[in-house]
Amino acid sequence: MGKEGLMGKLEEKIRNCRKCPLWELRTKPVPGAGSYDAKVMFVGEAPGYWEDQKGLPFVGRAGKVLDELLAEINLSREEVYITNIVKCRPPNNRDPTEEEVRACSPYLDRQIDIIRPKVIVPLGRHSMGYILEKFGFEPEPISKIHGKTFEAHTLFGKIVIMPTYHPAAALYKPPIRKELEKDFRKLGELLKEFG
């Protein structure tokens, strides 16, 4: 079975998931969107209001920032894959609980296995913590390690992990926008190495 078939089955599982209480509150689950052959995968923490309404990741104000950052390095949403650790919106946009992350993270792990990205960009501290720990690294404050690269070895080859701030942070703290732009330029250079 090809990537489309595998992702189709996985997305169906996510749509029918009842592993944690969030399914009772959701309007639409948000499996993820983009290319199943993406070289780069962006991972946020959980859907917000607009994502829950549309069933797509990063479609609110933070999504607009992400689109602008992608455009600056000549990438479109169609060329990357965007998802979250938790696939249903926590109430009032609160942080996901450990139980919710534990219930949902196997879906993200499977998405990584299917897509086999060259680079994973965790967006924000929650995503950074999960991804770094998954690949055996010690998480540090995002302000300290954003833009740094970590090399992980998987069954399907090397993955570079490059954490950065969540695009929403740029909306509340304008100086973070400059840091994000710098990190994305670094990402653009990194992707050139992969052709």
Image (cartoon, rainbow, N blue to C red):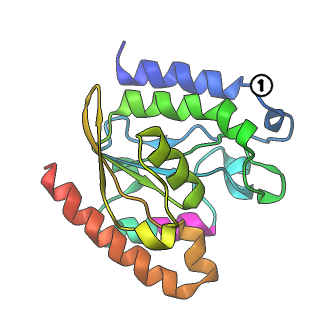
For the point 42% across and 60% down, the residue is 163
Residue furthest to the front: 138
- Going by the numbered disc 1, the residue's amino acid type is Arg
Residue furthest to the bottom: 175
> In the drawing, does residue 23 fall left or right of residue 3?
right
Residue 83 is one of the magenta-drawn residues: no
Name the residue that disc number 1 marks: 18
Label 1 crowding class (10 Å Cα cut-off): few <14, some 14-19, many 20+?
A: few
Does 103 appear above or below 132? above
**Residue 84, horizontal then vertical, whole percent:** 57, 46
Q: Quadrant of residue 31?
A: top right
Q: Which quarter of the rendered picture does the N terminus lie within? A: top left
For the point 61% across and 22% down, the residue is 12
Q: Quadrant of residue 190?
A: bottom left
Q: Does the rendering let one see residue 29? A: no
Residue 62 is one of the magenta-drawn residues: yes
Does 3 appear above or below 81? above
Q: Does the rendering let one see residue 145? A: yes
Closer to the camera in the image, 95 or 7: 95
Q: Which residues are magenta?
A: 61-66
**Residue 28, horizontal then vertical, whole percent:** 73, 39
Closer to the camera in the image, 192 or 162: 162
Magenta portion: prevailing SS class: helix
**Residue 193, horizontal then vertical, whole percent:** 14, 54
**Residue 195, horizontal then vertical, whole percent:** 13, 50
Does 130 appear above or below 162? above
For the point 55% across and 63% down, the residue is 63
Q: Quadrant of residue 10?
A: top right
